[in-house]
Image: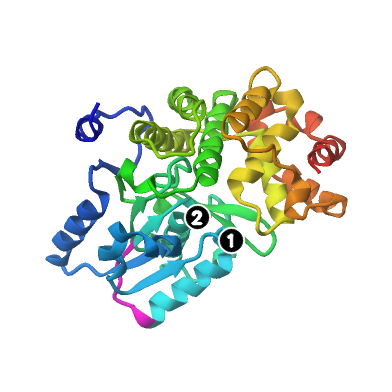
Amino acid sequence: MSTQDILTNFVATRKFWRTEVPTDIVLSRDGVADLLARLDENDKENRKPFFVIDKALTVQPQFKPLLGREPKFLFDATASEPRTDDVDMLVRMIRDNAPDVDLIVGVGGGGTIDLAKAAGICAANPKSAAEYQGWGLEMSKGLDIWVLPTLSGTGAEITPIAVLRGPEKKLGINNPHTAPAIAIIDPQLSREVSKFNRVYTMLDCYFHHYEITLSKTSAPDAIEDAWYGLDLARQVLGNDLTRYDLERAVLSVKASILGGSSTIGGRVGAAHAISYGLSNASPTLRHSVAVTLSRLGLKDLYQDDGYEETLRFLRINDLPAPRARDYGITEASIDKMVKTAIGMDKLWLSHFGESWRTAVTPEFLTEVYLAML
């Protein structure tokens, strides 16, 4: 099938998610052009956008029209996942230099999108971002949020969650006002993504869906979305992802959208709970790698298919199974990681149900973390 036929079919795709989402999902054959057209249309309404763009995109010519827009902030997503300090800095920048801004546009991978989402809502709220990490906290609506994802798998393009590293924990701002109003989805924008990022981001997507299919607290529609997303992620990961392939890119963006829709009505489980402990112990550890480490460390929970399947996907792509020690994590970090992980009660409840405290003990978590070193 030709490139044009693939894109025509993609743009014509009917709604394939069951969960109702608040985001206007725009399937596009030219995401940058569609975003610019919508921004130009908003100019007539005197809207004032602020851009948050992944710094890695500055060397890719297709993003040049966006890079010329002001005001903007370039986020170095390779240095760290977004931190609460990054959000506070960005909010101050907006308030001091662009007080009339009413729209924030995030362009990049999940970390850049989460930073834009967090700054968008925090711009209208008085406290520091760290004080809004959690669920059910009262927050005012901030800037409108639009996103153009350039990496597939995180689901950040439609979730009402902005995951941040804070001074004490890694946890999201979970609020309906954090959901993007518009997400423009173009599968061609991931063309320059490295094999490592392509594999690990889709592994995160795969784990996300897998955990929700096992969830005891997720809504039926979310579980149906997760089953569909799991199938798509498996179709992608069963291939060598060294080279970009448009048909696989289409499957990837669809899996990512389903990752977002399943999150709205669902909740991940054990591997994600474990991953937050790892992330607290290693500031440079990417979330996708942390979840992969967690999945492999929970062999007894996922031995039926998830454990061996994860190893198979890594072998297909000639990637070694990660070890926690590769990211500076040692036995000295275990107490800190156990404390973080055991506090993820909603995720343990999702996996084990009401009896989770019987299964999730400090001894159990210590054994799991030791197995990862």
Q: Residues within 10 Å of mark 2 (few under 14, many from 20)?
A: many
Image quadrant where residue 247 sits: top left
- Horizontally, residue 199 falls left or right of residue 271, namely left
Q: Are marks 1 and 2 in contact (CB under 8 Å)?
A: no
The quadrant of the image that shows the C terminus is top right
Q: Nearer the viewer, residue 148 or 195?
A: 195
Q: Which residues are magenta?
A: 97-104
Q: Identify the amino acid type marked 2.
A: Gly
- Residue 349 percent coordinates (x, y): 66, 32
Q: How is the image coloured?
A: rainbow
The quadrant of the image that shows the N terminus is top left
Separation of marks 1 and 2 at Cα, in angstroms: 9 Å
- Horizontally, residue 59 falls left or right of residue 340, namely left
Q: Nearer the viewer, residue 165 or 287?
A: 287
Q: Identify the amino acid type marked 1.
A: Ser
Check disc 2 and report the residue beneath it.
111
Q: Secondary structure at mark 2?
A: helix
Residue at 38% x, 46% y is 191
Q: Secondary structure at mark 1?
A: loop
- Residue 277 drawn above or below residue 80: above
Image quadrant where residue 267 sits: top right
101 is within the stretch colored magenta: yes
Residue at 63% x, 62% y is 166
- Residue 369 drawn above or below residue 49: above
Residue at the left extreme, as displayed: 44
- Residue 6 percent coordinates (x, y): 25, 31
Who comes first in sequence, dot 1 or dot 2?
A: 1
Check disc 1 and report the residue beneath it.
80
